[in-house]
Amino acid sequence: MLLCRPLLRAVQDAWRMSRDREHLLATFMENREALQAYLVRQFGNANVAEDLAQETWLRVASRKLGEQIGNPRAYIFRIARNLGMDLRRREALGIEVQADPVVVELVADARVDPLREAEMSRELQRLMQVVAELPARCREVFLLCRVEGLDHQQVAERLNISKSTVVSQMVKAMQRIEKAMQ
């Protein structure tokens, strides 16, 4: 198994994003009743409040995570409020919007498979452990090449070693990682 920077970053990003999404969805579930009560107060209709809460959940579940959310509860309430304001605007303009079944199906498919997520998490932990156990110079060369994205010449210059030493250290690192990850 050849590991490369994109795979390592993809595993790290997926792991972080799944944790962030889990936290966001858990925050939604903890605050669902308060959110619906807020929406009933804002829009005066329990059915509309329920629809807005469900649409909020869909938005939260399908959100492409990139940056950390400082206050997840406030973020969720803001989504709901904005959806409600959009609904009021559409009603004022006489626009009726139906949920497209294809979009609903895509949102459902966007959920992270918990088994795959757990597998990726274990694989990432194992990879981090294997890298940590590499000899110091070997680990340093591997991290500069695969995580920092430097080429062999740049690593050689930065560490004041020959390019052939960089290559041999990378070969050693990749062999140990591949063997340990099988």
Image (spheres, rainbow, N blue to C red):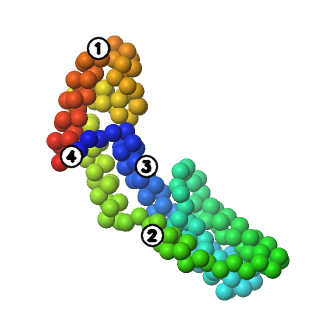
SS type, badge 1: loop
Q: CA distance from mark 1 to mark 4?
A: 28 Å
| N-terminal-most mark, 3 or 2 | 3
Query: Who's the residue at 36% across and 43% down the image?
Result: 8
Q: Dot 4: few (<14), some (14–19), or many (≥20) neighbours within 10 Å?
A: few
The amino acid marked with disc number 2 is: Asp
- Pinpoint residue 18: horizontal percent, then vertical percent: 43, 58
Query: Who's the residue at 81% across and 80% down the image?
Result: 94
Q: Dot 3: few (<14), some (14–19), or many (≥20) neighbours within 10 Å?
A: some
The amino acid marked with disc number 4 is: Met
User: Closer to us: mark 1 or mark 3?
Assistant: 1
The answer to which image quadrant residue 178 occupies is top left
Identify the residue under disc 1: 162
Residue 58, above or below 43: above
Q: CA distance from mark 2 to mark 1?
A: 49 Å
Identify the residue under disc 2: 109
Q: CA distance from mark 1 to mark 3?
A: 33 Å
SS type, badge 2: helix
26, 151: nearer the viewer: 151
Q: Quadrant of the N terminus?
A: top left
State left or right for residue 40 relative to residue 167. Answer: right
Identify the residue under disc 4: 181
| N-terminal-most mark, 1 or 3 | 3
